[in-house]
Image (cartoon, rainbow, N blue to C red):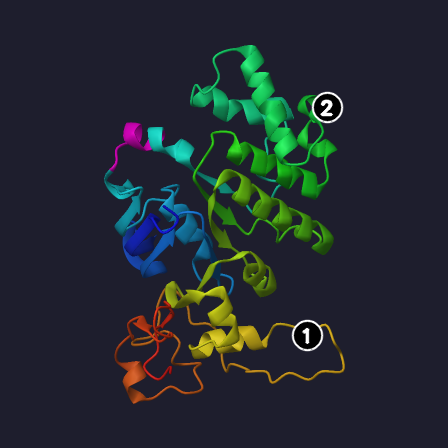
Amino acid sequence: MENDVLLSVKNLVKRFPIKGGILSREVAAVHAVSDVSFDIKRGETLGLVGESGCGKSTLGRCILRLIEPTSGQVFFKGQDLTQMGAQELRKLRRHMQIIFQDPYASLNPRMTVEDILGEPLDIHSICKGRAERTARIHKLLDLCGLRREAVSRYPHEFSGGQRQRICIARALAVEPDFLVCDEPVSALDVSIQAQIVNLMQDLQKELGLTYLFIAHDLKVVEHISTRVAVMYLGKVVEIGTAEELYADPKHPYTQALLSAIPIPDPTLRKQRTVLRGDVPSPISPPAGCYFHPRCPIAQENCKDSFPELRELGKEGRSHRAACFYAK
Protein backbone atom coordinates (compact mmCIF):
# COMPACT_ATOMS: atom_id res chain seq x y z
CA MET A 1 0.00 0.00 0.00
CA GLU A 2 2.91 2.39 0.66
CA ASN A 3 3.87 2.28 -3.02
CA ASP A 4 0.37 2.98 -4.33
CA VAL A 5 -0.02 6.10 -6.47
CA LEU A 6 -2.56 8.34 -4.73
CA LEU A 7 -2.47 11.26 -7.19
CA SER A 8 -1.49 11.26 -10.85
CA VAL A 9 -1.23 14.44 -12.96
CA LYS A 10 -1.21 13.93 -16.73
CA ASN A 11 -0.30 16.69 -19.23
CA LEU A 12 -1.89 19.44 -17.12
CA VAL A 13 -2.19 22.84 -18.83
CA LYS A 14 -3.53 26.15 -17.51
CA ARG A 15 -3.76 29.26 -19.67
CA PHE A 16 -5.27 32.53 -18.45
CA PRO A 17 -6.72 34.44 -21.41
CA ILE A 18 -5.96 38.14 -21.86
CA LYS A 19 -8.81 39.95 -23.56
CA GLY A 20 -8.81 43.30 -25.32
CA GLY A 21 -10.44 45.42 -27.96
CA ILE A 22 -14.05 46.52 -28.31
CA LEU A 23 -15.37 42.95 -28.47
CA SER A 24 -13.15 41.71 -25.62
CA ARG A 25 -11.62 38.98 -27.73
CA GLU A 26 -8.68 36.93 -26.53
CA VAL A 27 -5.53 38.69 -27.72
CA ALA A 28 -2.98 36.69 -25.71
CA ALA A 29 -2.72 34.24 -22.84
CA VAL A 30 -0.60 33.68 -19.74
CA HIS A 31 0.92 30.18 -19.94
CA ALA A 32 0.85 29.48 -16.20
CA VAL A 33 1.16 25.66 -16.33
CA SER A 34 2.43 23.92 -19.47
CA ASP A 35 2.10 20.16 -19.95
CA VAL A 36 2.98 19.03 -16.41
CA SER A 37 2.91 15.34 -15.45
CA PHE A 38 3.93 13.55 -12.24
CA ASP A 39 2.71 11.00 -9.67
CA ILE A 40 2.53 11.23 -5.89
CA LYS A 41 2.57 7.99 -3.94
CA ARG A 42 0.52 7.40 -0.83
CA GLY A 43 2.26 8.66 2.31
CA GLU A 44 5.05 10.63 0.59
CA THR A 45 5.77 14.36 0.32
CA LEU A 46 6.48 15.85 -3.08
CA GLY A 47 8.23 19.22 -2.74
CA LEU A 48 7.58 21.76 -5.51
CA VAL A 49 10.13 24.57 -5.91
CA GLY A 50 10.87 27.36 -8.36
CA GLU A 51 11.03 31.14 -8.71
CA SER A 52 8.03 33.37 -8.01
CA GLY A 53 5.57 33.31 -10.91
CA CYS A 54 6.66 29.91 -12.25
CA GLY A 55 3.18 28.40 -11.70
CA LYS A 56 3.58 26.43 -8.46
CA SER A 57 0.47 27.74 -6.69
CA THR A 58 -1.59 27.63 -9.89
CA LEU A 59 -0.63 23.98 -10.33
CA GLY A 60 -1.69 23.17 -6.76
CA ARG A 61 -5.04 24.88 -7.22
CA CYS A 62 -5.64 23.21 -10.59
CA ILE A 63 -5.05 19.79 -9.01
CA LEU A 64 -7.85 20.48 -6.50
CA ARG A 65 -9.94 22.21 -9.19
CA LEU A 66 -10.08 25.42 -7.21
CA ILE A 67 -8.97 26.75 -10.61
CA GLU A 68 -10.29 24.91 -13.66
CA PRO A 69 -7.41 23.53 -15.78
CA THR A 70 -7.43 24.31 -19.50
CA SER A 71 -6.60 20.70 -20.41
CA GLY A 72 -5.06 17.55 -18.99
CA GLN A 73 -6.14 15.04 -16.37
CA VAL A 74 -5.83 14.67 -12.59
CA PHE A 75 -6.45 11.19 -11.19
CA PHE A 76 -7.11 10.93 -7.45
CA LYS A 77 -7.53 7.39 -6.14
CA GLY A 78 -8.02 6.34 -9.76
CA GLN A 79 -10.83 8.82 -10.42
CA ASP A 80 -10.43 11.61 -12.98
CA LEU A 81 -11.21 14.87 -11.16
CA THR A 82 -11.34 16.86 -14.40
CA GLN A 83 -14.36 14.88 -15.63
CA MET A 84 -16.39 15.12 -12.42
CA GLY A 85 -19.50 17.21 -11.98
CA ALA A 86 -20.06 19.49 -9.00
CA GLN A 87 -21.90 16.88 -6.89
CA GLU A 88 -19.30 14.14 -7.46
CA LEU A 89 -16.46 16.54 -6.74
CA ARG A 90 -18.12 17.77 -3.54
CA LYS A 91 -18.17 14.22 -2.13
CA LEU A 92 -14.48 13.79 -2.90
CA ARG A 93 -13.40 17.18 -1.53
CA ARG A 94 -13.19 15.94 2.06
CA HIS A 95 -10.35 13.64 0.98
CA MET A 96 -8.18 16.48 -0.42
CA GLN A 97 -7.62 19.81 1.28
CA ILE A 98 -5.36 22.87 1.03
CA ILE A 99 -3.34 24.95 3.50
CA PHE A 100 -2.92 28.49 2.19
CA GLN A 101 0.16 30.68 2.37
CA ASP A 102 -1.18 33.61 4.39
CA PRO A 103 -2.75 32.65 7.74
CA TYR A 104 -3.86 36.28 8.18
CA ALA A 105 -5.96 36.30 5.00
CA SER A 106 -7.25 32.72 4.96
CA LEU A 107 -9.27 32.90 8.21
CA ASN A 108 -12.59 34.73 8.48
CA PRO A 109 -12.07 37.49 11.11
CA ARG A 110 -15.76 37.34 12.11
CA MET A 111 -15.71 33.64 13.00
CA THR A 112 -14.48 32.08 16.23
CA VAL A 113 -12.14 29.09 16.15
CA GLU A 114 -15.11 26.86 16.98
CA ASP A 115 -16.99 28.19 13.95
CA ILE A 116 -13.92 27.88 11.68
CA LEU A 117 -13.26 24.25 12.62
CA GLY A 118 -16.94 23.34 12.85
CA GLU A 119 -17.88 24.64 9.39
CA PRO A 120 -16.27 21.78 7.38
CA LEU A 121 -17.75 19.26 9.84
CA ASP A 122 -21.22 20.71 9.20
CA ILE A 123 -20.79 20.92 5.41
CA HIS A 124 -19.84 17.25 5.13
CA SER A 125 -22.24 16.09 7.91
CA ILE A 126 -19.43 14.35 9.78
CA CYS A 127 -20.73 14.74 13.35
CA LYS A 128 -24.11 13.45 14.52
CA GLY A 129 -24.63 15.74 17.46
CA ARG A 130 -23.38 18.81 19.29
CA ALA A 131 -21.34 16.78 21.79
CA GLU A 132 -19.54 14.82 19.05
CA ARG A 133 -18.86 18.06 17.15
CA THR A 134 -17.33 19.72 20.23
CA ALA A 135 -15.23 16.64 21.03
CA ARG A 136 -13.90 16.56 17.47
CA ILE A 137 -12.97 20.26 17.56
CA HIS A 138 -11.12 19.72 20.86
CA LYS A 139 -9.25 16.76 19.34
CA LEU A 140 -8.20 18.90 16.36
CA LEU A 141 -6.87 21.59 18.69
CA ASP A 142 -4.92 18.98 20.65
CA LEU A 143 -3.47 17.53 17.44
CA CYS A 144 -2.22 20.93 16.29
CA GLY A 145 -0.81 22.07 19.63
CA LEU A 146 -3.48 24.63 20.58
CA ARG A 147 -5.28 25.09 23.90
CA ARG A 148 -8.92 24.08 24.06
CA GLU A 149 -9.82 27.52 25.44
CA ALA A 150 -9.07 28.87 21.95
CA VAL A 151 -12.50 27.77 20.68
CA SER A 152 -14.18 31.01 21.75
CA ARG A 153 -11.47 33.35 20.43
CA TYR A 154 -11.17 35.15 17.09
CA PRO A 155 -8.24 34.98 14.59
CA HIS A 156 -6.93 38.46 15.48
CA GLU A 157 -6.20 37.22 19.02
CA PHE A 158 -3.57 34.75 17.79
CA SER A 159 0.00 35.04 16.50
CA GLY A 160 0.92 34.08 12.93
CA GLY A 161 2.14 30.62 13.93
CA GLN A 162 -1.02 29.93 15.95
CA ARG A 163 -3.19 31.04 13.04
CA GLN A 164 -1.38 28.65 10.74
CA ARG A 165 -2.02 25.87 13.26
CA ILE A 166 -5.73 26.77 13.08
CA CYS A 167 -5.53 26.55 9.27
CA ILE A 168 -3.90 23.11 9.53
CA ALA A 169 -6.58 21.99 12.01
CA ARG A 170 -9.31 23.20 9.62
CA ALA A 171 -7.75 21.21 6.77
CA LEU A 172 -7.58 18.08 8.96
CA ALA A 173 -11.16 18.41 10.21
CA VAL A 174 -12.61 16.27 7.40
CA GLU A 175 -9.90 13.55 7.69
CA PRO A 176 -8.28 14.09 4.27
CA ASP A 177 -5.78 11.79 2.60
CA PHE A 178 -4.03 14.48 0.55
CA LEU A 179 -2.99 18.04 1.40
CA VAL A 180 -1.73 20.77 -0.92
CA CYS A 181 0.51 22.91 1.29
CA ASP A 182 0.84 26.21 -0.59
CA GLU A 183 3.89 27.85 1.01
CA PRO A 184 2.54 27.24 4.53
CA VAL A 185 5.61 28.64 6.32
CA SER A 186 6.79 31.49 4.09
CA ALA A 187 4.82 34.16 6.00
CA LEU A 188 6.21 33.06 9.39
CA ASP A 189 9.35 33.79 11.42
CA VAL A 190 12.18 31.28 11.02
CA SER A 191 11.78 29.80 14.52
CA ILE A 192 8.04 29.37 13.96
CA GLN A 193 8.67 27.83 10.54
CA ALA A 194 10.59 24.99 12.19
CA GLN A 195 7.72 24.33 14.61
CA ILE A 196 5.14 24.19 11.81
CA VAL A 197 7.30 21.93 9.63
CA ASN A 198 7.88 19.56 12.57
CA LEU A 199 4.15 19.57 13.32
CA MET A 200 3.35 18.68 9.71
CA GLN A 201 5.84 15.82 9.76
CA ASP A 202 4.38 14.48 13.01
CA LEU A 203 0.85 14.70 11.61
CA GLN A 204 1.91 12.91 8.44
CA LYS A 205 3.30 9.98 10.43
CA GLU A 206 0.33 9.85 12.80
CA LEU A 207 -2.46 10.24 10.22
CA GLY A 208 -0.83 8.75 7.11
CA LEU A 209 -1.11 11.97 5.09
CA THR A 210 0.25 12.69 1.61
CA TYR A 211 1.59 16.19 0.85
CA LEU A 212 2.28 18.37 -2.16
CA PHE A 213 4.55 20.87 -0.43
CA ILE A 214 5.02 24.14 -2.35
CA ALA A 215 7.78 26.44 -1.06
CA HIS A 216 10.56 28.87 -1.90
CA ASP A 217 12.90 27.82 0.89
CA LEU A 218 15.03 25.07 -0.60
CA LYS A 219 16.35 23.91 2.79
CA VAL A 220 12.81 23.48 4.16
CA VAL A 221 11.86 21.49 1.07
CA GLU A 222 14.94 19.26 1.44
CA HIS A 223 14.06 18.62 5.10
CA ILE A 224 10.42 17.67 4.61
CA SER A 225 10.26 16.13 1.12
CA THR A 226 10.54 12.56 -0.08
CA ARG A 227 10.89 13.72 -3.69
CA VAL A 228 11.34 17.18 -5.21
CA ALA A 229 10.07 18.67 -8.49
CA VAL A 230 11.62 21.86 -9.90
CA MET A 231 9.44 24.20 -11.99
CA TYR A 232 10.55 26.87 -14.44
CA LEU A 233 8.08 29.05 -16.36
CA GLY A 234 5.19 26.60 -15.98
CA LYS A 235 7.11 23.39 -16.75
CA VAL A 236 8.68 20.75 -14.53
CA VAL A 237 12.36 20.66 -15.54
CA GLU A 238 13.63 18.12 -13.00
CA ILE A 239 12.15 15.62 -10.56
CA GLY A 240 13.80 13.08 -8.29
CA THR A 241 14.33 11.98 -4.72
CA ALA A 242 15.31 14.82 -2.37
CA GLU A 243 18.58 13.10 -1.47
CA GLU A 244 19.64 12.53 -5.09
CA LEU A 245 18.45 15.88 -6.47
CA TYR A 246 20.22 17.95 -3.81
CA ALA A 247 23.41 15.86 -3.97
CA ASP A 248 23.63 15.72 -7.77
CA PRO A 249 21.33 18.16 -9.60
CA LYS A 250 21.19 17.46 -13.34
CA HIS A 251 19.37 20.42 -14.88
CA PRO A 252 21.33 23.72 -15.20
CA TYR A 253 18.44 25.62 -13.62
CA THR A 254 18.38 23.32 -10.59
CA GLN A 255 22.14 23.70 -10.25
CA ALA A 256 21.75 27.50 -10.24
CA LEU A 257 18.96 27.35 -7.65
CA LEU A 258 20.92 25.14 -5.28
CA SER A 259 24.05 27.23 -5.66
CA ALA A 260 22.08 30.20 -4.26
CA ILE A 261 21.41 28.47 -0.91
CA PRO A 262 23.33 30.46 1.72
CA ILE A 263 25.93 28.70 3.87
CA PRO A 264 25.78 29.54 7.62
CA ASP A 265 29.58 29.40 7.95
CA PRO A 266 31.10 32.76 6.81
CA THR A 267 34.57 31.20 6.47
CA LEU A 268 33.41 28.92 3.63
CA ARG A 269 33.15 30.11 0.05
CA LYS A 270 30.67 28.59 -2.37
CA GLN A 271 30.77 28.52 -6.15
CA ARG A 272 27.73 30.47 -7.37
CA THR A 273 26.03 29.94 -10.74
CA VAL A 274 24.85 33.38 -11.85
CA LEU A 275 22.19 33.26 -14.57
CA ARG A 276 22.16 35.94 -17.23
CA GLY A 277 19.03 37.93 -18.07
CA ASP A 278 15.57 37.73 -16.53
CA VAL A 279 12.82 35.12 -16.54
CA PRO A 280 10.93 35.41 -19.87
CA SER A 281 7.31 36.52 -19.81
CA PRO A 282 4.76 33.67 -19.47
CA ILE A 283 2.65 35.56 -22.03
CA SER A 284 5.20 34.85 -24.76
CA PRO A 285 7.57 32.08 -23.61
CA PRO A 286 10.59 31.45 -25.86
CA ALA A 287 10.54 28.78 -28.55
CA GLY A 288 12.22 25.48 -27.76
CA CYS A 289 13.51 25.01 -24.23
CA TYR A 290 12.09 27.79 -22.05
CA PHE A 291 15.39 28.02 -20.17
CA HIS A 292 17.72 28.35 -23.17
CA PRO A 293 17.99 32.21 -23.15
CA ARG A 294 19.60 32.01 -19.67
CA CYS A 295 21.25 28.60 -19.85
CA PRO A 296 25.08 28.47 -19.64
CA ILE A 297 25.26 25.24 -21.71
CA ALA A 298 22.54 25.94 -24.33
CA GLN A 299 23.17 24.83 -27.93
CA GLU A 300 21.39 25.58 -31.22
CA ASN A 301 18.93 22.68 -30.93
CA CYS A 302 17.74 24.06 -27.56
CA LYS A 303 16.12 26.95 -29.46
CA ASP A 304 13.99 24.64 -31.60
CA SER A 305 12.44 21.96 -29.35
CA PHE A 306 11.70 21.44 -25.67
CA PRO A 307 13.47 18.38 -24.21
CA GLU A 308 11.33 15.71 -22.61
CA LEU A 309 11.83 14.64 -19.00
CA ARG A 310 14.17 11.66 -19.31
CA GLU A 311 15.66 9.20 -16.86
CA LEU A 312 19.11 10.10 -15.60
CA GLY A 313 19.24 8.45 -12.20
CA LYS A 314 20.93 5.26 -11.13
CA GLU A 315 19.23 1.97 -11.84
CA GLY A 316 16.23 1.48 -9.57
CA ARG A 317 15.89 5.22 -8.85
CA SER A 318 13.70 7.73 -10.61
CA HIS A 319 15.56 10.95 -11.39
CA ARG A 320 14.43 12.80 -14.52
CA ALA A 321 15.52 16.07 -16.09
CA ALA A 322 14.32 18.01 -19.14
CA CYS A 323 17.69 18.84 -20.68
CA PHE A 324 19.41 17.55 -23.83
CA TYR A 325 22.84 17.81 -22.23
CA ALA A 326 22.21 16.72 -18.64
CA LYS A 327 24.24 13.64 -17.67
Q: Residue at x 51, y 38 (%)?
A: 207
Q: Residue at x 63, y 24 (%)?
A: 138
Residue 153 x, y percent position in the rendering: 70, 25
Residue placed farthest to the left in the image? 83
User: Disc 2 marks which amino acid?
Assistant: Glu
CA gap, disc 2 and disc 1: 42 Å
Q: Specify whether residue 232 is in view.
A: no
Closer to the camera in the image, 126 or 190:
126
Q: Residue at x 63, y 41 (%)?
A: 164
User: Disc 1 marks which amino acid?
Assistant: Ile
Q: Specify whether residue 170 is in view.
A: yes
Q: Quadrant of the N terminus?
A: top left
Q: Is residue 103 above or below residue 26?
A: above
Q: Is residue 164 above or below residue 141?
A: below
Most common secondary structure along the magenta stretch:
helix
Closer to the camera in the image, 320 or 274:
320
Q: Quadrant for residue 291, please give it.
A: bottom left
Q: Secondary structure at mark 1?
A: loop
Q: Quadrant of the C terminus?
A: bottom left
262 relative position to 65: left or right: right
Q: Residue at x 59, y 34 (%)?
A: 107
92 relative position to 219: left or right: left
Q: Secondary structure at mark 2?
A: helix
Q: What residue did someone put label 2 on?
A: 149
Residues rendered magenta in the picture: 84-90
Q: What residue did someone put label 1 on?
A: 263
Closer to the camera in the image, 300 or 130:
130
Q: Quadrant for residue 303, please give it.
A: bottom left
Q: Residues within 10 Å of mark 1 (few under 14, many from 20)?
A: few
Q: Is residue 9 above or below residue 119?
A: below
